[in-house]
Amino acid sequence: MTFYQGQSLADAVREATAVLTDAGVPSPRVDAELLADHLLGVGLGRLRAMVLGDAPAPDGYRELVEERAGRVPLQHITGVAYFRHLELRVGPGVFIPRPETESVVQLVIDHVSGLPNPKVVDLGTGSGAIAGSIAFEVPGAEVHAVEYSMLAHAWAARNLEPLGVILVEGDLRDALPEHNGTFDVVVSNPPYIPAEAIPTEPEVALHDPPEALYGGGADGMVLPTAAAASAARLLKPGGYFVMEHAEVQAAWIAGMLQRTGRWNNVTTHYDLNGKERATSAILATLSPDE
Ligand SMILES: C[S@@+](CC[C@H](N)C(=O)[O-])C[C@H]1O[C@@H](n2cnc3c(N)ncnc32)[C@H](O)[C@@H]1O
């Protein structure tokens, strides 16, 4: 790495981009700019204007670029992940929220529009991205969140307390028994990656916690199946369940929900890239003899 203190910002960002490109970072120029902005705190628009001028490179830039070239996630370096309207605190031990999950939140928001004070739970909340967004965007919602990992729970507590979300440390398989049959919505982005499908990007393979990635079993379906069973336990009859999954799992999940006989309106939803990313269903009303 050749850039040093005293170098111009323009030269440093150009060289950082080359370093990140060589390291295989997917969006090298933007990451180089965001790292500079992390130090300067001026916002990306102003930073780009500064790059056109003769501003100097900020102190500490080289170290941050070296870290990113080692494929440490950008969000672990800056400590922040942006998700819908939220700026979430993140770091080691918690899953970095992904843009495709934003469309899962939209499904919940669309579903609850018109419901007074909807009661919602997010199973496996991680940083609190889903639960926090619903609390922020749906006035009057009562939002609960469950997280099993102690580390992730600590990040979620930091993000969710200011938003009034009721967070519990627990297992999505048996959490919140005192709330059985009371929720309007159960939403989950559970771990769902099959055991053998180890992600290739170092940011994911080395920095997302394994308990956030692997769903259990060769097909990754143990925890998604458990989340569906918990949804059937936690929802009111007529309540809405929506779960994120991998594109290749859509048909399997729809079939799994249908086979239980507990769900109506099983529907697959696409993300912004046109991938089958989530499945929703409505909990059937039990007949009197059930
Ligand atoms: C794919 S991450 C999703 C995190 C967050 N909901 C999001 O969308 O960014 C799955 C989360 O489920 C948590 N988790 C894994 N097993 C769990 C369990 N048995 N009970 C509750 N949470 C669990 C993981 O620690 C992780 O935070």
Image (cartoon, grey):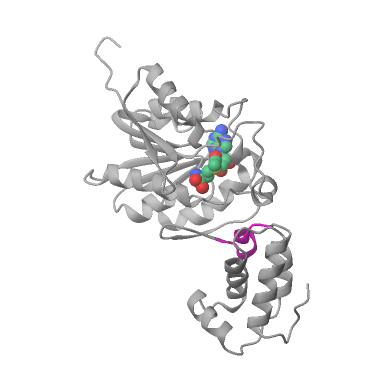
Does 78 appear in magenta? yes
Answer with left or right where residue 16 lies relative to residue 282. Answer: right
| 180 over 271 or under it: above or below | above
Pick the residue in front: 63 or 26: 26
Image quadrant containing the N terminus: bottom right
The spot of residue 245 in percent (x, y) is 48, 36
Q: Which residues are magenta?
A: 72-80
For the point 66% across and 70% down, which residue is it? 17
Q: Is residue 174 visible?
A: no
- Which quarter of the rendered image does ligand 1 occupy? top right
Q: Is residue 39 above or below residue 125?
A: below
Asked if the magenta segment contains residue 3, the reply would be no
Left or right: where 102 falls relative to 11: left
Name the residue nearer the viewer: 17 or 232. 17
Among the 4 quarters of the image, the one containing residue 182: top left
Residue 24 in the image: state x and y as whole percent.
68, 58
Observer-nearest of 159 and 45 = 45
For the C terminus, the image quarter is top left
| Whole-percent x, y for residue 132 in the image | 43, 52
Residue at horizontal 43%, vertical 38%?
A: 276
Q: Residue furthest top?
A: 289
Is residue 259 toward the left or the right of residue 29 in the image?
left
Q: Is residue 196 above or below residue 16?
A: above
- Decide if residue 12 is in sight here: yes
Place of residue 228 in the rendered image (x, y in percent of width and height, measured from the top left):
44, 28
| Image position of 22 (left or right of 178) | right
Residue at the outermost right position: 2
The residue most toward the bottom is 54
